[in-house]
Image (cartoon, rainbow, N blue to C red):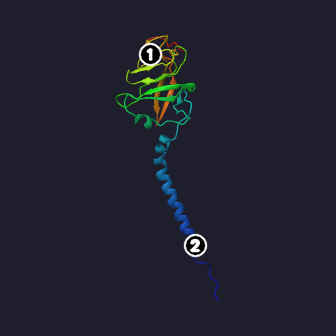
Amino acid sequence: MENSLPIDSPSLSRRQLLNFLTGAVVASTIGPALYPVAKFFSPPKEVGADGSILAKDINGNLIPASQLLAEAPGTRALVAGLAGEPTYLTIQEDGTLHPWGIVDNCTHLGCTFPWNENDDQFQCPCHGSRYDAEGRVIRGPAPLPLRLAHIYLEGDYVRIAPWVELDPRTGKKPWWV
Ligand code: FES
């Protein structure tokens, strides 16, 4: 009786080698192409070099910018901002985010307040202070305009950064700096 070697061993090895080579070619071709896509959708660093943070919802989940920008122009979206302070983001008429965030903290005694879209004002329920759409005082007792924060996009995420430059509403150093 003739002793023969199993015939599938060499062909299995060839198949494995072919699979490996095919996988390597596919990975080296598609991998670099997918990198920018993966980078776009993966969240950037939580805290930026400029002291910024990523906007989150009330449950601490990151809010995709695409979700915010799908809202109607004029929408005020309340997000968790710097030091956890609620901050209003505004969708502008052209569908972009307003570069100023308005901190939801009344300058009278610190109440939070809603946006009244009928009056186009922030209206504090505690003692009746009113602010215009950019946070200027319309009616006291609030003594000062609302605090601002910088708003900008990084990929599909929204960054909120401290505002330390001149207050564009007064042309002066911000009272909160
Ligand atoms: S805390 Fe807002 S008016 Fe007093």
Residue 135 is situated, as x and y percent measured from the top left of the image, at: 44, 18
**Front residue of this view, candidates 123 and 44:** 123
Q: Nearer the viewer, residue 122 or 90?
A: 122
Label of residue 130 in the image:
1
Q: Amino acid at mark 1?
A: Arg
Q: Residues within 10 Å of mark 1 (few under 14, many from 20)?
A: many
For the residues labelled 2 and 1, the Cα–Cα distance comes to: 82 Å
SS assignment at label 1: strand
Q: Secondary structure at mark 2?
A: helix
Q: Which mark is residue 10?
A: 2
The residue at label 2 has a CB less than 8 Å from ligand 1: no
The residue at the point 54 percent across, 32 percent down is 58
The residue that appears at 56% across and 65% down in the rendered structure is 16
Question: Which residue is located at x 50 percent, y 20 percent?
Answer: 163
Camera-nearest label, 2 or 1 = 1
As drawn, 55 above or below 140:
below
Q: Quadrant of residue 77?
A: top left
Task: Decide if residue 167 is in sight here.
Answer: no
Do the numbered discs 2 and 1 sit on residues whose CB atoms are within 8 Å? no
Left or right: 83 as drawn, with respect to 88:
right
Look at the picture and state if 87 lies above or below 24.
above
Q: Earlier in the sequence, mark 2 or mark 1?
A: 2
The picture places residue 102, in percent across and down from the top left corner, at 47, 22
The x, y position of residue 53, in whole percent, is 54, 29
Residue 173: mark = none
Taking depth in this image into account, of 149 and 61 the one nearest to the observer is 61
Is ligand 1 less than 8 Å from the beta carbon at label 1? no
For the residue pair 38 and 136, the one nearer the viewer reads as 136
